[in-house]
Image (spheres, rainbow, N blue to C red):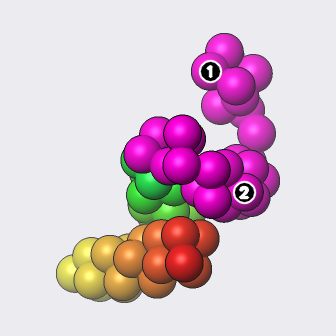
Amino acid sequence: MRDGRWTTVPAEKRLQVYHKAFADDVMRLEAADAVINLCHERADAKFKGRQGDGCDVAYDAIECFWRHTN
């Protein structure tokens, strides 16, 4: 999963993979790190080009992280 091909997979699809891995204690820390990064990447793309102070991106990323880790 760490080779160059993995980064070409859309963030939403990678989130699904890490969402499943989060339940496994061995992968929990790595999955949490990956989920927050992917949620932020997804939020950046979602709000790209829109005016705002960055709160929309932060709120969306936090909501995404909560959804995929609980």
Which mark sits nearer the N-terminus, 1 or 2?
1
Position of the N terminus, as image quadrant, is top right
Q: From this viewpoint, is residue 46 visible?
A: no
- Residue 54 or 63: which is nearer the viewer? 63
Of the residues tagged 1 and 2, which is closer to the observer?
2
Which residue, as the protein is rendered here, is positioned at the far front?
25
Q: From this viewpoint, is residue 24 visible?
A: yes
User: Which residue is label 1 attached to?
Assistant: 2
Q: Which three-letter amino acid code belongs to the residue tagged 2? A: Lys
Q: Is residue 48 above or below residue 60?
A: above
Q: Is residue 39 above or below residue 28?
A: below
Position of the C terminus, as image quadrant, is bottom right
- State the CA–CA distance, disc 1 to disc 2: 17 Å
**Image coordinates for residue 11, horizontal then vertical, percent:** 66, 52
Residue in view at x 42 percent, y 45 percent: 29
Q: Is residue 9 above or below residue 23?
A: above
What's the mark number on residue 32? none
Residue 2 belongs to magenta span? yes
**Image coordinates for residue 52, horizontal then vertical, percent:** 29, 84
Q: Quadrant of residue 20?
A: bottom right
- Residue 63 or 8: which is nearer the viewer? 63
The residues colored magenta run 1-30
Categorize mark 2 by other alpha carbons within 10 Å: few (<14), some (14-19), many (20+): some
Horizontal placement of 26 versus 33: left or right? right
Horizontal placement of 55 versus 2: left or right? left
Which residue, as the protein is rendered here, is positioned at the far top?
3
User: Which residue is label 2 attached to?
Assistant: 20
